[in-house]
Image (cartoon, rainbow, N blue to C red):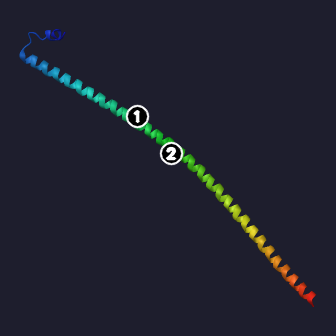
Amino acid sequence: MSWALEEWKEGLSPRVLQKIHELESQVDKLKKERQQRQFQLETLEAALQKQKQKVENEKNEAATLKRENQSLMELCDSLEKAKQKISHDLQVKESQVNIQSGQLNSSKKDIERLEQELKR
């Protein structure tokens, strides 16, 4: 088959044949170069898709972390309010204990006084 491709060149001058050979070589070189660039393009496109997927995964992870952070902040706020309520309740109870302690001391003094009066 290649002889049919070469048949049209019969009778051409050596100078023209040389130029044809140069052009054919250049075409082969350009075809190889095109194949290499196509391969590079496909490789770069694959890398781009991989990077896009990575970015998408990181966006999803960031959104998940943001939701988790918001949830933890709400939990912290809730715990802070509970702590404040417990602290307030403790203060109220300490105040009640102090009042009752004062009443107890007063009652003890009253009892001592009454015992002293009874002894007399």
SS for callout 2: helix
* Residue under the image location 13 percent in, 22 percent down: 22
* Residue under the image location 50 percent in, 45 percent down: 62
Amino acid beneath label 1: Gln
Discs 2, 1 touching: Cβ within 8 Å: no
> Badge 1: how crowded within 10 Å, few (<14), some, or many (20+)?
few
* Residue under the image location 89 percent in, 88 percent down: 116
Quadrant in which the N terminus appears:
top left
Q: Is residue 44 above or below residue 81?
A: above
Considering only order in the chain, which callout, 1 or 2, is on the residue closer to the N terminus?
1
Q: Is residue 66 above or below residue 26?
A: below
Most foreground residue, 107 or 94: 107
Most foreground residue, 110 or 45: 110
Q: Is residue 65 above or below residue 89?
A: above
> Badge 2: how crowded within 10 Å, few (<14), some, or many (20+)?
few
The residue wearing badge 2 is 62
Q: Which residue sits furthest front?
A: 119
The residue wearing badge 1 is 49
Amino acid beneath label 2: Ala
From the viewer's perspective, tell me whether residue 77 is left or right of residue 4: right
Q: Position of residue 90 (x, y in %)?
A: 72, 66
Q: Position of residue 61 (x, y in %)?
A: 50, 43
* Residue under the image location 77 percent in, 71 percent down: 97
Q: Position of residue 53 (x, y in %)?
A: 44, 36
Q: Is residue 20 above or below residue 85?
A: above
Residue 108, located in which quarter of the rendered image? bottom right
